[in-house]
Amino acid sequence: MIEYWHNPRCSKSRQGLALLQEKGAEVEVIEYLKTPPAIARLKEVARLLGVAPREMMRTKEAAYKELGLADAGDEELFEAMHRQASLIERPIAINDSKAAIGRPPENLLAIL
């Protein structure tokens, strides 16, 4: 079962979900804006992605600038993503010990 952090208002997120479903993947859709991931889960997903927390963030979001996150440390970034889930890059798919950011959506194929 693939855990899919989804924003239904985002075209890339909708495209990624459709791609996984076309490939026959079982997907558990999590609307992360309604149910933000816990800080521990964010850390685990960053590790699975093999990225620093900033690399899984939408750094062009107004909230990123408003919160002054440009010079923030990792812990502060994880806390910000938990408090303001719109900062999390989308979509993210997790399959066991693998994860991918679906930008472009074809990146998600690597976790199948």
Image: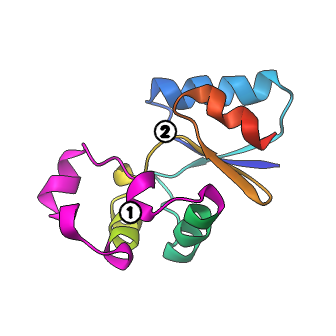
Q: Residue at x 86, y 28 (%)?
A: 24
Q: Residue at x 57, y 36 (%)?
A: 102
Question: In what quadrant of the picture does the C terminus appear?
Answer: top right
Q: CA distance from mark 1 to mark 2?
A: 15 Å
Where is residue 95? Give x, y as percent: 77, 51
Question: Based on the displayed image, in which of its 4 quarters is residue 44 positioned?
Answer: bottom right
The boundaries of the magenta stretch are: 48-76
Seen in the picture, residue 103 relative to 67 is either above or below; the reply is above
Q: Say what secondary structure mark 1 lies in.
A: helix
Seen in the picture, residue 38 relative to 22 is either above or below; the reply is below
Seen in the picture, residue 90 relative to 83 is either above or below; the reply is above
Where is residue 51? Give x, y as percent: 52, 59
Q: Which mark is residue 7?
A: 2
- Nearer the observer, disc 1 or disc 2? 1
Q: Say what secondary structure mark 2 lies in.
A: loop
Where is residue 81? Give x, y as percent: 38, 63
74 displayed left or right of 98: left
Q: Which mark is residue 81?
A: 1
Seen in the picture, residue 101 relative to 38 is either above or below; the reply is above
In the rendered image, the residue lying farthest to the right is 24
Where is residue 13? Give x, y as percent: 53, 32
Q: Determine crowd level at label 2: few under 14, some 14-19, many 20+ residues with C-alpha closer than 10 A.
A: many
Question: Based on the displayed image, in which of its 4 quarters is residue 49 positioned?
Answer: bottom right
**Residue 73 versus residue 26: which sits nearer the camera?**
73
Looking at the rendered structure, the kind of residue marked 1 is Met
For residue 68: magenta?
yes
For residue 10: magenta?
no
Looking at the rendered structure, the kind of residue marked 2 is Asn
Q: Residue at x 56, y 76 (%)?
A: 40
**Residue 87 versus residue 104: which sits nearer the camera?**
104
